[in-house]
Amino acid sequence: MVTSWLLKIVLVTVLFFFVAIEGLSPIIVKMQLSGYAQDAADAGTQALINGDASSAKAAAQQSADMHAGVTSSVTVSDDSRTVTVTMEKKAKSYFSDWSALRSWYDVKVTETANRGQ
């Protein structure tokens, strides 16, 4: 009698943590990507202060490329005041192959940094 209740509690606890980790995976990846993209945009902005748009784009791309498994794109505005970095990554999951949940695990973040003045 006691072992059946204990077994139920253990199973429910394990199931709860599994679902929580699966659900939080994209949120954690989004927070990581946001930081990476902001760092890359800031690196590009620093290069804008000291150089031109092409050096800013190269600096931002170099900073973005330091992170494995991340797809990134960098743009510099026409007036050379803003650097925009977009990063994408697929969050790890056991459910990411289900078509209904696929978009939940495809994480995309865009961050922008402006040159002062």
Image: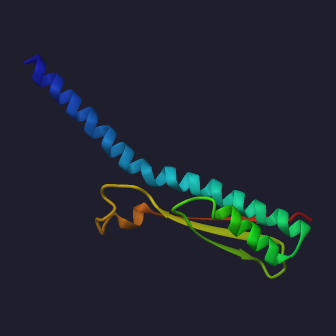
Judging from the image, the colouring scheme is rainbow
> Residue 101 in the image: x percent, y percent?
34, 63
Q: Image height check: is 41 above or below 13?
A: below
User: Which of these two is toward me, 30 or 70?
Assistant: 70
**Number of marks drawn:** 0
> Residue 91 in the image: x percent, y percent?
44, 58
Q: Residue at x 36, y 66 (%)?
A: 102
**Image-based side of 65 in relation to 117, left or right:** left
Q: Residue furthest top?
A: 2
Q: Quadrant of the N terminus?
A: top left
> Residue 96 in the image: x percent, y percent?
34, 61
Residue 110 image-quadrant placement: bottom right
**Image-based side of 67 in relation to 12, left or right:** right
Q: Residue at x 69, y 69 (%)?
A: 61
> Residue 75 in the image: x percent, y percent?
71, 76
**Image-based side of 106 in relation to 55, left or right:** left
User: Which of these two is toward me, 52 or 111?
Assistant: 52
Q: Residue at x 30, y 69 (%)?
A: 99
User: Which of these two is toward me, 62 or 19?
Assistant: 62
Q: Residue furthest left?
A: 1
Q: Residue at x 21, y 27 (%)?
A: 9
Q: Image height check: is 107 above or below 80?
A: above
**Image-based side of 73 in relation to 29, left or right:** right
Residue 70 image-quadrant placement: bottom right
Q: In which quarter of the image is the C terminus?
A: bottom right
